[in-house]
Structures are given as C-alpha cells and as structure tokens.
Image (cartoon, rainbow, N blue to C red):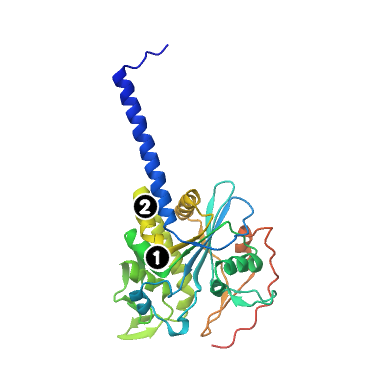
Amino acid sequence: MPPTPSPARRRLLLAAGAAVVAIVAAVAVDAAVLVHRIPTVEVTPPGSRDGTAYLLLASDSRDRLPAGDRERYADRAQATGERADLVLVLRRTAAGEAEVLSIPRDLYVGARAGDPHRLGLALEGGAQTMVTSLCRDLGIGVDHVAILDFRGLIDLVDSTGGVLVSTREPLRDLKAGLSLPRAGRHRLGGEQALAWVRSRQPEVLRDGRWTPLAGADRTRTSHAVDVLEQAAAGLDGPVAAHRALWALGPRLRRDDGLGVRATASLALDLRAAVAAGRVRTAPARSTSTEVPVAFATAETRAALAPFQTPSCTTAPQAPAPQAPAP
C-alpha cells in the first residue's frame, strides 16, 4: 500500500494540479478569443470524401483594405469586387497524410454548365459561389473555407520573419511595387512579398535597359505557393503560431464551422504538408493573351483526381477554345 502523502505534499500536489488546470483553461480561452476574432462568411461546404479538406483563398478585394492600402493597391480595372488571387486545397486523408494542391486561378471552367468563367472570378459571387464552382466544375468538395485578404499576406510574412527569393537578374514591376535592384537572394518583408506574388509585368535589367520578362504571369501561382510555404514553415512553435494568428485575425474570414479545433488542425496540416514536400500545382495550358486563361489538360485532370469527391457532380468540360494569337 503506497504511503499517504503528507499534508504539505498534498497541498503542493493540489496547487500544481490547479495551476495546470488554470494554464489549460487560459490556453483554451486564448485560442477561442484568437479564432473568434476571425469574422465568418455565409457558406455551406459540400464536404469531402474522407479525412478533411480546406479551401484556402487569397482575395484581391480592395474594399476590405485600410484606407492607406486601398489607395496604394488601387486598380482602375478592378476597383471593386473580389476575386481569388490564389486557390489552394489542403487535404488530410483519413490515414493522416496532409497534401496541398494549388489550382490555377485562371483555369477555364463551367462551360458545360452554361456558366463559363475563370475559376478565380467565382469569388465575385461570394464564398458559396466559389465553393459551388469548385464542386460542380472540378468535382472537389471541401469541409471548410478560409479567405486571406491582401493585408493578411503582408502581416503573415512579417510575423514569421520574411521570406527568401532568388532572381537571376535585377528585377522590378512598377505597377506591383516590386523592386529587386540586384541579382541573387533577397529577404522580403511583407509588402515586397505581396508585390512578388502580384507581379504581372516584371522587367529585368539587361545591358543597362529594363526589358519586359516574357511569360511572367504564369509564375504568379508558384511565387504565391513558395511564399506561403515559407510562411507556414515559420510557424515553428505555439508562440509563432499565436503571434501570426493574432496578426491575421481581422484579415482572415472563415466558415462558421471552422472553430478552435478545426483551425488548429488546419495550421498543423498545412505545416505537415509543407514539411513533407507535399505541395504541388495542377498543371494547365496557359495562353499568352492580354487576359490570361488556363485550359485543363489530361495532366490537370490527373492532378485533381485525388482531391475529387463523389458527392460533387463534375460537369464535363467543353473542348478548350483556340487561344487567339498574342
């Protein structure tokens, strides 16, 4: 029979137990406060086939920016409304393996359903329209939705210490506000990281002259994925995750079901996918027209297949129209 603890030891054990309970309660309350700082959007996700799938969107909405940023990122062609600059599906299988698929925002979808559009434009109709297009046109169902605003990417990068990018030549994009005046590796803060992701019309310095870099728009998705991968890798502990989530709260939106536990799972799954190198971009055939369009190929359909859900009816895609000459 074990000895009975002395009164002093019992008091010490009770005090230690009370402290642990208090810490756990404080962490739970803190997590709840962090998550509930994130506003919700009205959306009913169709659900996925096994495990859990999250739709992660980066929004180009200027309406949600602070006044100073709204002026800085003003675009006459897109003064109002909202489109998805980045479309990611994060999936954790029932076996616990996490993977991320980046889908080109310019992917031409919806033709057979009588609603032809580029995928990213579906967000103009709201989160539900975006989720519906993903399900109806690509056969992908998700369980949760998270939308990151312009300013959110800046805050995320700054909160995780910046990101590293490499260029072979000095590079700039006056419209995007990107300036990398030398070749080599660069550590970018949030604003330059956003410019790197948004750059559509970069120029390189060759023989003393700034020359347009052909085909650069096709690199936007890979730039965005790289920036998010590095930022996710920077969430290397509870303190870093807490700091990032606190900074991002007002700049994020989520479905109502994305509560404390699901948000924690999302963060862990994203970090696991990045750490394991299971982040890829669905290939597509892109045009070089003024308004870029990407068309699905056999390789695109193969990349989408593991993420598709039986409950989502995929409308057969019409043959891709011939792209006009540039």
User: Element under label 1?
Assistant: helix
Q: Residue at x 31, y 73 (%)?
A: 183
Q: Is residue 235 left or right of residue 136?
A: left
User: Element under label 2?
Assistant: helix
The tag earlier along the polypeptide, 1 or 2, is 1
Q: Which residue is mark 2?
A: 242
Q: Which residue is mark 1?
A: 152
Q: Which is nearer the eye, 297 or 85? A: 85
Residue 55 occupies which quadrant of the picture? bottom right
Q: Is residue 305 left or right of residue 25?
A: right
Spatial CA span between label 1 and label 2: 15 Å
Q: Is any part of residue 300 visible from this angle?
A: no
Q: Is any part of residue 68 visible from this angle?
A: yes
Amino acid beneath label 2: His
**Residue at the farthest top position:** 1
Q: Position of residue 146 (x, y in %)?
A: 49, 61
Residue 293 vertical placement versus 222 (above, below)? below
Residue 228 occupies which quadrant of the picture? bottom left
Q: Residue at x 39, y 80 (%)?
A: 74
Answer few, some or many: residues within 10 Å of disc 2's Cα (few below 14, many 20 plus, some between 14 and 19). Answer: some
Q: Position of residue 103 (x, y in %)?
A: 55, 67
Q: Residue at x 34, y 55 (%)?
A: 243
Q: Position of residue 1 (x, y in %)?
A: 42, 11
Residue 64 vertical placement versus 238 (above, below)? below
Q: Which is nearer the eye, 82 or 266? A: 82
Amino acid beneath label 1: Gly
Residue 112 vertical placement versus 97 (above, below)? below
The disc label shown at residue 268, or none: none
